[in-house]
Amino acid sequence: MGGRMSRRAFNRGLAWTAGAVGVGAAGMAAVRAQDLGDLGNIDPSRPLLFSSPKLEPFVDPLPMLPVLTGSQLELRAASTTHRFHRDLQPSPALAYGGMDYLGPTVEAHDGDPLTVAYRNEIGVHPLAADFDTTLHGVTEQDRTAVPTSMHLHGAVTPPEHDGHPAFLQRPGQGHVHHYPNVHEATQFWYHDHAMGITRLNVYAGLAGMFLLRDEFDTGAAGNAWGLPSGEFELPLILQEKIFTADGRQSIRATPVVPQGRWDGGTPGDVGVVNGKIWPELEVARGTYRLRIVNAASFSVWNLFFGNRMRFWVLGMESGMLAAPVPTTNVRLAPGERVDLLVDFGALEPGATVELCNDEPPPLAASQRGARPMPLFCRFKVAGGRGFTGAVPETLRGGAGQPADLEPVPAPQVQRTVTVMQLPDPSSGSVLMSLNNLRFGDTDIEMPRQGTVEQWNIVNVTPEPHPIHLHLVNFRVLGRQAFDLSRYTRENPAPPVGTKWAPPVDAFVTGPLIPPAAWEAGRKDTVVANPGEVTRIVAVFPTAARLGFDPDATFGVGEVAAPVPASPQHAGHGTPAHAGHDTAPAMSGQLQGYVWHCHMLDHEDHDMMLGFRTVAE
């Protein structure tokens, strides 16, 4: 075979990631040999999974996230303690901006540049024992001198302010981010993006919402569409988690995978909204605007209300749709956001309705015994009337509204990329890969500035993967099934480290299925389903259009000047292991952006690659 991976080996890799690893007789025997009580919370009917303690839902109120506004802000990442449920003790967490979990909602305005002085003040990481030093870029030092890299997801930012995963700040270090905010109103979110530990930093609490306003979507009464505002507009950060018996966050899903070793992902078994487990919110009888982000590490959710009532999708990641889309469910993958209009006015006072999920877990997780995490929160209807505006007929193109969505531009270049899951001989585990490469490989995509490109994302795995591109927004053309067996048989994959992205058009087996109605606008993250090619179109902007060079090099010595300590930390509180404020977090020059799977477990090992936008 001349060093080429055989079809049998390729398919064995797919089967392995579909649940065969650690689920065989040896894995079961290892679990049976243990006293289940020593392993944590394990349901005997699902011995391959840890379980959270039994908790009563709807006993905690839904937290309202504080709002930060202004042209110059400070956000500091710190170690905290947080109570996730009334019946759990406060437990270690991470947070931004003085909160004890997550971060405040940042509000900014289109065209008004924003400066955010970020500083890492993390002392103890609550998941330090889960750092896997076999992953790319992760070292023993990281457990105590925790690296971070804050990313404003969805924003168009200069490369040195994008939160590159190799552009790290350790405790005592910071970076002053400059965000142009040249974008129509939408909902971004900010989160950590440090190489190899993104899943751990975000899971521990480093995430927050970012609402960008403009002349139409002002965030106040009298906006262009008469939408709910103020107390009737609710940012909701949705997560799912596993907790230990003493109430600590746990990233571990299965006793088969030892602590400190990477796991490909399993759904949590409790829903967390704005930092509380299964909270309840009392709502008035009227309409609400729910700004939702899937901030989970792993799961795609099919969201619906327990009574199957209708709601409307106003927009997704990158702005408003052409018109509200009525529906009773919406599918949301990690990294995706959705802007919903929900009418509680038809419900009687005292009625309750839950926000639910019924998306089945991927095959590997279901073979371990995972089930859909079914519940996020409950809304309880009060007696008073709330906001009673009508559902707008259109969102674009009308008088006093933003311009209509432009037609999808004709691609000048077509580019095929592949999403893969392979055996990882170096660790005995699984390698998540794009184009058969690891993150450090240099054979990256290099689209030219000013070019319209169609990316054909070919998923040869048994799982859905949400693919996120930094820098650009894109439009979804649709998805097509293809003959996976023939595609891999006629295009044998080479050893890992050699790019593998064969053209797929000769192998499609059905028509192009248009995107769901709520996916028809501008996006930055898209679900690539297993056995399908997902086609998107993006314009890679020029430096002249952006006002900055997207291909500029950057490095710690140039742009990562220390941010002064906050008053409460000045002169103390910086861990001794962090070194001096001027100590570099890394060396060398960086260039470009990244694209990756937004299942954070996958991104960390190694379903992420760099890309550069080169000048003509």
Image (cartoon, grey):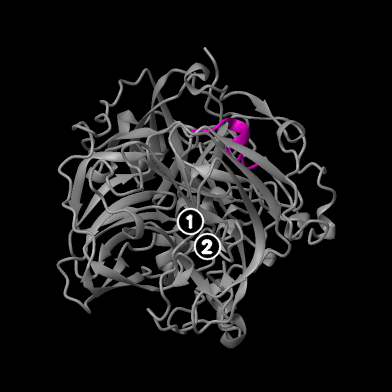
Quadrant (top left, top right, bottom left, bottom right) of the N terminus: top right
Q: Residue at x 46, y 59 (%)?
A: 296
Pointers 1 and 2 in contact (C-beta within 8 Å): yes
Q: Nearer the viewer, residue 31 or 388?
A: 388
x and y percentages locating residue 269 in the rendered image: 44, 72
In the rendered image, the vertical position of residue 396 relative to residue 376, given as above or below? above
In the rendered image, the vertical position of residue 608 relative to residue 415, given as above or below? below
> Which segment did they paint magenta?
156-166
Q: Nearer the viewer, residue 230 or 255?
A: 230
Chief SS of the magenta region: loop
Disc 2 marks which amino acid?
A: Val
In the rendered image, the vertical position of residue 532 relative to residue 123, given as above or below? above
| Mark 1 nearby-residue class (10 Å; few <14, some 14–19, many ≥20) | many
Residue 21: image tag:
2
x and y percentages locating residue 329 in the rendered image: 24, 57
Alpha carbon distance from label 1 to label 2: 7 Å
In the rendered image, the vertical position of residue 272 relative to residue 614, given as above or below? below
Secondary structure type for disc 2: loop
User: Image check: 589 left or right of 156?
Assistant: right
Asked if the magenta segment contains residue 38, the reply would be no
Secondary structure type for disc 1: helix
Residue 156: image tag:
none
x and y percentages locating residue 100 in the rendered image: 59, 66
x and y percentages locating residue 182 in the rendered image: 45, 31
Q: Nearer the viewer, residue 6 or 127?
A: 127
Q: Residue at x 42, y 33 (%)?
A: 183
Q: Residue at x 56, y 26 (%)?
A: 612
Disc 1 marks which amino acid?
A: Thr
Residue carrying label 1: 17
